[in-house]
Image (cartoon, helix red, strand yellow):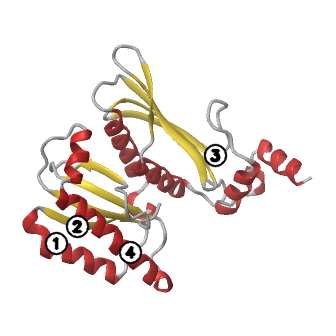
Amino acid sequence: MSVSEYNRIDQIFVSPEGRLVLAMSEERPYRPEDSHVLDEDFRNKINSYIHAARSGHAHHLARENGVENVNGIDIVLYSRTHPSAAVLRLIGRVNDELSTEGIRAAWESIASEDLGIEVIERALVDESVRLMGSEWKIALMWVTLMGRDGAAGIQVERHDGSIVNVQASEGLLALLSEHKRAFSDSRLGTWISGQILINGEDIYRSQFSNSDVPEWMPQPTDDNLREELAMYPREAGEVPVWVRERIGSAQG
């Protein structure tokens, strides 16, 4: 994800303080040579978020999700690399000029070295619980991701025994990508599929596989397999047999 999509709010949720959070994610690295592009994208994005906050659109979205009362609005940029000075200046201006309107801005790092796998998994569970709502008994968050393509969702069992499927949010997908990076190993590569069984907000068990994609999950293409090994190299002996056979037959 990137902040180049100006006319949408990537994610909206309520913080423990009761503030409405309008979140945006930037996966592109902040580098000096790309600064002019990313800085302009962020300027347009944050202006769009400010308009949503001031016009009442953000509160309307919150009410649609069952949230009636909030204690202000936070606009938060999530990125793996440290934002440029221009981006930080814009964030500072929001805090200086709009705090009296209850609007604040901030940057938070989602770099794996800052978070750690356990923290990311806790965030995955929190986001899954938020998406499921209040009426659920048990849930299975699942994901398959090879290269840059994949799919994810949450299978939820309600208290009445009914089963529903909940679509993954942009925030959940971003956390899964970060978890995959944090999980990577020079010898073993990283996971290609995973599941988190959620029995309660603080009761869950995770299982991620570097070698298998269950049959009931969407299956990767040959191009996905090649891209995965290019992005996350692993020792030859750790490449699953079925992956070698697929790529070998495709190349032959």
**CA distance separating discs 2 and 3:** 38 Å
Q: Earlier in the sequence, mark 2 or mark 4?
A: 4
**CA distance separating discs 4 and 1:** 19 Å
Q: Amino acid at mark 2?
A: Ala
The residue that label 1 is drawn on is 95
- Considering depth in this image, is 172 or 230 the residue closer to the camera? 172
Mark sitting on residue 210: 3
**CA distance separating discs 4 and 3:** 30 Å
The residue that label 4 is drawn on is 82
Q: Residue furthest left?
A: 100
> Do the residues under discs 1 and 2 have CB atoms within 8 angstroms?
yes
Q: Position of residue 105 (x, y in %)?
A: 23, 67
Q: Residues within 10 Å of mark 1 (few under 14, many from 20)?
A: some
Locate residue 185: give its quadrant.
bottom right
Q: Residue at x 25, y 67 (%)?
A: 106
> Do the residues under discs 3 and 1 have CB atoms within 8 angstroms?
no
Q: Residue at x 64, y 59 (%)?
A: 232
Question: Which structural element holds mark 2?
Answer: strand
The residue that label 2 is drawn on is 105
Q: Can you tell which of label 2 and label 4 is closer to the viewer? A: 2
Q: Residues within 10 Å of mark 3 (few under 14, many from 20)?
A: some
Q: Earlier in the sequence, mark 2 or mark 3?
A: 2
Q: Position of residue 43 (x, y in %)?
A: 33, 75
For residue 131, above or below residue 185: above
- Considering depth in this image, is 212 or 38 the residue closer to the camera? 38
Question: Which structural element holds mark 4?
Answer: loop
**CA distance separating discs 3 and 1:** 44 Å
Q: Amino acid at mark 3?
A: Asn
> Do the residues under discs 4 and 1 have CB atoms within 8 angstroms?
no
Q: Amino acid at mark 4?
A: His
Q: Is residue 208 visible?
A: no
Q: Earlier in the sequence, mark 4 or mark 1?
A: 4
